[in-house]
Amino acid sequence: MVEVFAVASGKGGTGKTTSTVALGMALAPRYAVTVVHADTGLANLLFPSGLRAAETAPHDVLAHRAT
């Protein structure tokens, strides 16, 4: 079964990225987790999670530059 969690707010600086990374990392040892940061202008889950840059970002898919 697939579960979906959304973290959203209309205001910047409320801790959405930090909370999303923490939630994903807390669930990852027990579940298969995919975290998507949909802020097409400033999507930056890489820095707080310690990951390398991804080849394809959500804005690439939305702009039809990737699938």
Image (cartoon, rainbow, N blue to C red):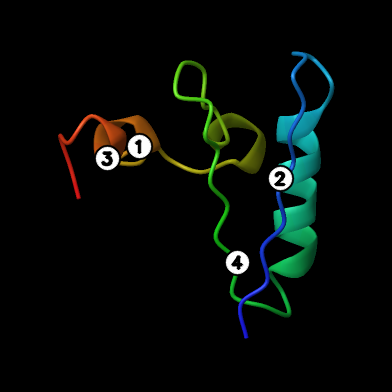
Picture disc at residue 61:
3
Residue under circle 1? 57
Q: CA distance from mark 4 to mark 2?
A: 11 Å
Residue 13 on image: x %, y %: 79, 14
Discs 1, 3 touching: Cβ within 8 Å:
yes
Q: Say which element carries label 1.
A: loop
Where residue 19 appears, as percent x and y from the top left, is 81, 40
Q: Nearer the viewer, residue 67 or 49?
A: 67
Disc 4 marks a residue whose amino acid type is Val
Amino acid at pointer 1: Ala
Q: CA distance from mark 1 to mark 4?
A: 17 Å
Residue found at x 26% / y 33%: 60
Q: Nearer the viewer, residue 14 or 8?
A: 8
Position of residue 50 relative to residue 67, above or below, is above
The spot of residue 51 in percent (x, y) is 51, 43
Task: State if disc 4 and disc 3 touch (CB < 8 Å).
Answer: no
Q: Which residue is mark 4?
A: 33
Q: Residues within 10 Å of mark 3 (few under 14, many from 20)?
A: few
- Going 62% across and 86% down the picture, which residue do you hit? 1
